[in-house]
Image (spheres, helix red, strand yellow):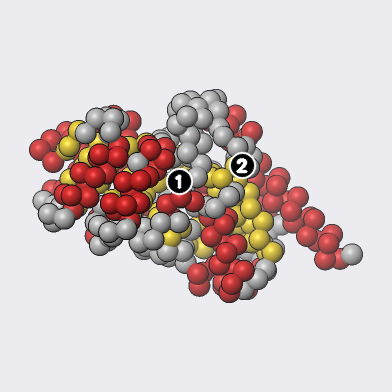
Amino acid sequence: MSFPLGVAQRQAFGETMASLAQDDARILVLDGDVGSSTGASLFEEAHPERYLQTGIGEQNMVAMAAGLSTLGFVPFVTTFSCFAVARALDSVRVLVAQTGLNVKLIGGYAGLLTGMTGKTHQMFDDVAIMRSLPNMTVIAPADEVEARQVIRAVAALEGPAYVQIIREPSPVLFGDEYRFEIGKAVMVREGSDATLVSTGAESVRVYEAAAILARRGIDVGVLHVPTVKPIDEDALVRAATTTRFMITIEEQSVIGGLGGAVAELLADRFPVTVKRLGIRDCFGESGPNDLLLDKYRLSAARVAEDVETLFRERVTATTN
């Protein structure tokens, strides 16, 4: 199974921001000198008077956004995820999360596929870090359709939010009828043998992996979790009740991200077997997208292989 290729999430972000600002004079965009890469330049073209170029000073950029929010503006801070989270974390933690100010943080170039920038720019723990901050909403859209709706939703949300935006064009998982809601997961495929839980653009590859598995006689459900915090507890418990076997897959570290969130929740509410697939406690590297996805076992084919192995092991263990 394959899906049509959509525009890059960064383009969807820039176009949506430009459209939002037409109707809301409070919208501002602050850029850390990477607007042509994050899609923020599309906003600059449409609303140059509300585009603030701060240069390579991410901590100061977050501080500026915090101050502007106290004046009634809705500032969107845009830079690469590695800079928005790792470099600016002190400002994010103290000035935005602790105060609960209405600042939106857009982490561009998220995940593994960052245009061959390599390990210095690849950020695999931004979800883990940001979901650990009180008051912070954390969202990773799957495709351009969801990305557009996510941006509108966080603009309307009162309080801080972090949105993960990927660089590359990705297949379109959702149709025009789809409606994103903060805090809600989406069961995009029903299944009885296991539930695959994913977030961000990885959900498209996981859906494709489920189709591969179906041809091998393994029936898995796919639960897409765009909002990692606040996570949809009820949807996860329902899925766990149905299959009693949960496998998380994410283009993030297996430590502390979606897999950690799911394991923590189900340990409290409905203990079942939870296995985590993702980047195994290592840094990334430069390389073509397809090769990186295969090496880190995040392509549809590799996900299907690993899920099948986990399923066969489970069947063997329960029958012996």
Which one is in front, 51 or 247?
A: 51
Q: Quadrant of residue 55?
A: top left
Callout 1: few (<14), some (14-19), or many (20+) C-alpha neighbours within 10 Å? many
Q: Residue at x 47, y 29 (%)?
A: 120
Residue named by callout 1: 126
Query: SS at mark 2?
Result: loop
Residue kind at label 2, given as amino acid type:
Asp
- In the depicted structure, whether residue 143 falls above or below residue 101: above
Residue kind at label 1, given as amino acid type:
Asp
- Label whose residue precedes the other's in the sequence (2 or 1): 1
Residue named by callout 2: 281
71 to the left or right of 15 = left
Measured from the top left, where is residue 220 in percent x and y?
A: 65, 59
Q: Quadrant of residue 42?
A: top left
Query: SS at mark 1?
Result: helix
Q: Residue at x 53, y 44 (%)?
A: 251
261 to the left or right of 209 = left
Taking the image as drawn, is residue 72 in sight? yes
107 to the left or right of 269 = left
Which one is in front, 205 or 257?
A: 257
Q: Residue at x 47, y 67 (%)?
A: 232
CB within 8 Å, label 2 to label 1: no
